[in-house]
Image (cartoon, rainbow, N blue to C red):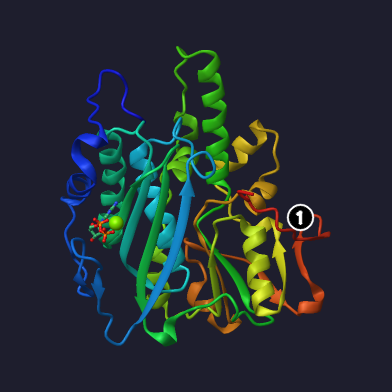
Amino acid sequence: MLADKNEARTSLEELGEFGLIKHLTKGFSIHQESTLKGIGDDAAILDFKDSKAVVSTDLLIEGVHFDLSYMPLKHLGYKAVVVNLSDIYAMNAMATQITVSLAVSNRFPLEALEEFYSGVAAACKVYGVDLIGGDTTSSTKGMLISITAIGQAVEKDIVYRNGAKENDLLVVTGDLGGAYLGLQVLERENEVFKVNPGNQPDLEPYAYLVERQLKPEARKDVVELLEKLEVSPTAMIDISDGLSSEILHLCGQSEVGCNLYEDKIPLDPTVISTSEEFKMDSTMIALSGGEDYELLFTIDQNDFPKIKGNPSLTVIGHMCEKAEGAHLVARDSSKIPLKAQGWNSF
Ligand code: ADP
Ligand code: MG
């Protein structure tokens, strides 16, 4: 949260750009062997030897992608890093470095940026990635964050979106819909707070959902698990926009169709109870909610015994001929065409 009246507020002008960069990045050190040079020169230098470099970048805009009235800055720093790392893991690669670029208006004191960087540092620690650079500049209004994540993988291990084959099984990690409902809960409490600032929201019953929204995790563990199980997915994507739109990406790029079974979609009990409370359909939320940052991948049927019974992995459908199209097979066995209703900032 932006520092309130009783907290220290050090203006960014006091430090100057170089002082600010130095201050924000002084707690970071280098852990990856591939980082030859990190922060401090005109560019960073990386050496991946026999591996391929994997690169992904994201731009986040205040008011479009995040709302500081309920997103604490520390969580924002953590989440901004995690969502980028998720893209690296979705290639079946290991994340190794990030760069962080920021533009802030003068309404942000130094203490706010310290909070943001404490979240960045926490994510770097949890995922073992090095902060190797970035850029810092001013904006006329609000905060903009751009993060680039870099990773490595040997060529044969890299998994694209376009490798799914007919009859492959469709597998998802974790459970879906929590992050979207967490956002609904936070927005509802925020509205209540605006009307009645004395009201203390009780978020405890929604702790899992709020955590899924404010502190998502990327599935590095799943990339490691797949290696251990000796399973090579044929195609993979991370779920940022909702199951439906990600399935359509896999189908489109792989030129196959898909049957997704409604009764197989993994839902946490709080997702089921809270969707009832909001009078929403939990399947719709899983299909269109987004921001769960789980992995969605396809495997050859012969690999099924290797993943069977694993609590992190659920088979939710199978791929079919392209001409059959992509459908949800509902509980009553009716087939409903999947639509890309993913969360879209436009
Ligand atoms: P330049 O003028 O070449 O853009 P800067 O003064 O912006 O250089 O950056 C100096 C060093 O600090 C570089 O290594 C750059 O990558 C790093 N850096 C700048 N801003 C940030 C930031 N917000 N977070 C992390 N590193 C940063
Ligand atoms: Mg610069």
Hey, which quadrant is residue 88 in on the image? bottom left
Q: Residue at x 22, y 25 (%)?
A: 8
Judging depth in this view, the residue of 162 and 35 nearest the camera is 35
Reading the image, the residue beneath label 1 is 331
Q: Residue at x 36, y 69 (%)?
A: 150
Badge 1 residue CB within 8 Å of ligand 1: no
Query: Residue 221, image x and y in percent?
Result: 38, 64
- State left or right for residue 15 relative to residue 119: left
Hey, which quadrant is residue 255 in on the image? bottom right
- State left or right for residue 185 relative to residue 49: right
Query: Residue 296, image x and y in percent?
Result: 55, 66
Q: Residue at x 43, y 49 (%)?
A: 216
Judging depth in this view, the residue of 199 and 276 nearest the camera is 199
Q: Residue at x 27, y 60 (%)?
A: 133
- State left or right for residue 196 relative to residue 36: right
Residue lying furthest right: 334
| Type of the residue with mark 1 | Arg
Judging depth in this view, the residue of 226 and 128 nearest the camera is 128
Height in image: 163 above or below 345?
below
Task: Give the structural element (helix, strand or loop) at label 1.
Answer: loop
Query: Residue 319, image x and y in percent?
Result: 69, 75
Quadrant for the N terminus, please: top left
Q: What is the crowding at mark 1: few (fewer than 14 residues within 10 Å), some, or many (at least 20)?
A: few
Hey, which quadrant is residue 168 in on the image? bottom right
Query: Residue 217, image x and y in percent?
Result: 41, 53
Ligand 2 quadrant assignment: bottom left
